Amino acid sequence: MRSGDISRTSFRPVLLLSAATGLLAAAAAAAGLFWQGTGGPRTVADIYGRTFELDGRGLYANDTLFAAGNNRASDLLRKLPTSPAGS
């Protein structure tokens, strides 16, 4: 084998790990998008007396409304390339 030749079998582990990573990313994004759980927004106060409204639903229950919205948007953008319609 010449130094410039790379066999196809040397890429097999890379392809398998890439596929596994893609599947796990798709599962995590789907959980963030579709698992809503129970509850709703709730207001909490920090030690300085400032109040914050938390999302209260699903995976992002303990995030502020702003952060939860950003996280769901990120999940959507992560999910699109892994869905059959996004390919």
Image (cartoon, rainbow, N blue to C red):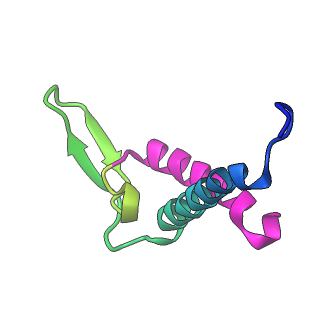
Establish if 38 lies above or below 8.
below
Residue 31 screen position, x and y as percent: 48, 66
Q: Is residue 66 above or below residue 72?
A: above
* Magenta residues, start to end: 63-87
Quarter residue 58 falls in: bottom left
23 or 58: nearer the viewer = 23
- x, y (%) of residue 57? 37, 64
Provide the major secondary structure of the magenta segment.
helix
Q: Residue at x 53, y 64 (%)?
A: 33
Image quadrant assignment for residue 42: bottom left
In the picture, measured across the screen, residue 19 lies left or right of residue 28, that is right
Q: Could you tell me which quadrant the C terminus lies in?
A: bottom right
Residue 68 in the image: above or below residue 37: above
In which quadrant of the rendered image does the N terminus lie? top right
Q: Who's the residue at 61% across and 51% down the image?
A: 73
> Which residue lies most toward the top here?
48
Residue most extreme to the front = 1
In this rendering, position of residue 77 left or right of residue 31: right
**Residue 73 located within the stretch drawn in magenta:** yes
Residue 68 in magenta stretch: yes
| Apparent side of residue 33 relative to residue 13 in the rendered image (left or right) | left
State the residue in front, 34 or 18.
18
Q: Nearer the viewer, residue 59 or 41?
A: 59
Q: Residue at x 43, y 70 (%)?
A: 36
Closer to us: 20 or 54: 20
Image side of residue 69 versus residue 13, left or right: left
Residue 75, picture quadrant: bottom right
User: Residue 74: image x %, image y %?
Assistant: 59, 48
Q: Position of residue 68 (x, y in %)?
A: 46, 50
Q: Residue at x 64, y 50 (%)?
A: 14
